[in-house]
Amino acid sequence: MDHVTSADGTTIAYVTQGAGPALVLVSTSLDDHHGLDATAAALARDFTVVGYDRRGVGESGAGEPWAPEREVEDLAAVIQAVGGSAALAAGSGGCGLVLEAATALGDAVTGIYLFEPPFIIDDSRPPVPSDWVEQVETLVAESRRGDAVELFMTQVVGVPAEYVEGMKADPSWEASAAYAHALPHDGRILAGTQDGKPLPTDRWRVEQPAVVAVGADSEPFFHAGAQALVDQLPRGRYENLPGVDHSAFWTAPDAIAASIAAAFDRPVTGPNG
């Protein structure tokens, strides 16, 4: 990986592949850039794809004390390192950071693609617990990282409790537990968007072209939140992707790559050119 220094001196690790306009993939705080390897490889047919480890995760520095502004500065440093401007794409919890960056960085962000931002704006699903971030921080401080991930999965993501034991048997569980300390990062960025109330209208000022996509098989609250966000974006467009659900950003790379390429008016070359 290459490395760049953020505004506060924190080292941020990133990697590039492919050719074409720059596109930075923003992971959730529970994952390093490898979580999007398949999606990045599919997108590299049409873009110079940039994956990076958010601060406190993977090969990037911890950069304490953490703040949302520091993460925006990290993205600014990565964008500068790859040419000075780039589109941004994220799924789920990473969408909040993309909105913050698009608001703060202006023309350095050429467009954004968001897949299923986890907004809860009505009663289509229960809101997240108001103190879940503090609960996770307490569990991490007690070296109970697995319990922190379990709390997040069941009380925030909404995974039924009976599925958790099966998830723990997968090697990805231990990888997630290693980054449990970073879960509060997305939690704080998304504060005020998951409590069953309308989205704040003064939070983001995104003038760039924006696509907010949702899988047709996903829960209704994703569709409601996406449409509410699009209504706030002057150049926003809502897209319903057939045959996929919330996992698609990680597990259906070809479908996501085609959707992103179309969003940014790129030809879709496909796996065989």
Image (cartoon, helix red, strand yellow):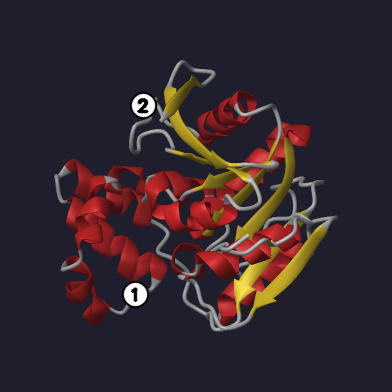
Q: Does residue 195 appear in this view?
A: no
Q: Position of residue 220 (x, y in %)?
A: 58, 81
Amino acid identity at mark 1: Val
Q: Position of residue 144 (x, y in %)?
A: 15, 51
Q: Residues within 10 Å of mark 2 (few under 14, many from 20)?
A: some
Q: Residues within 10 Å of mark 1 (few under 14, many from 20)?
A: some
Determine whether 221 is above or below 88 in the image: below
Q: Give the numbered dot on residue 51.
A: none
Q: Position of residue 235 (x, y in %)?
A: 84, 56
Determine whether 188 is above or below 65 in the image: below
Identify the residue at horizontal 67%, vertical 27% (top origin): 83
- Comes first in the chain, label 1 or label 2: 2
Q: Does residue 100 appear in this view?
A: yes
Instruction: Point out the residue furthest to the top here.
Output: 9
Q: Describe residue 203's horizontal placement relative to residue 124 as left or right.
A: right
Disc 2 designates what residue?
61
Q: Secondary structure at mark 2?
A: loop
Determine whether 52 is above or below 151 in the image: above
Q: Secondary structure at mark 1?
A: loop
User: How many badges with numbers are in the image?
Assistant: 2
Q: CA distance from mark 1 to mark 2?
A: 31 Å
Asked if marks 1 and 2 touch (Cβ < 8 Å), the reply is no
Q: Position of residue 13 (x, y in %)?
A: 43, 30
Instruction: Point out the residue furthest to the front here.
Output: 272
Amino acid identity at mark 2: Gly
Q: Quadrant of the N terminus?
A: top left
Disc 1 designates what residue?
159
Identify the residue at horizontal 57%, vertical 62% (top origin): 117
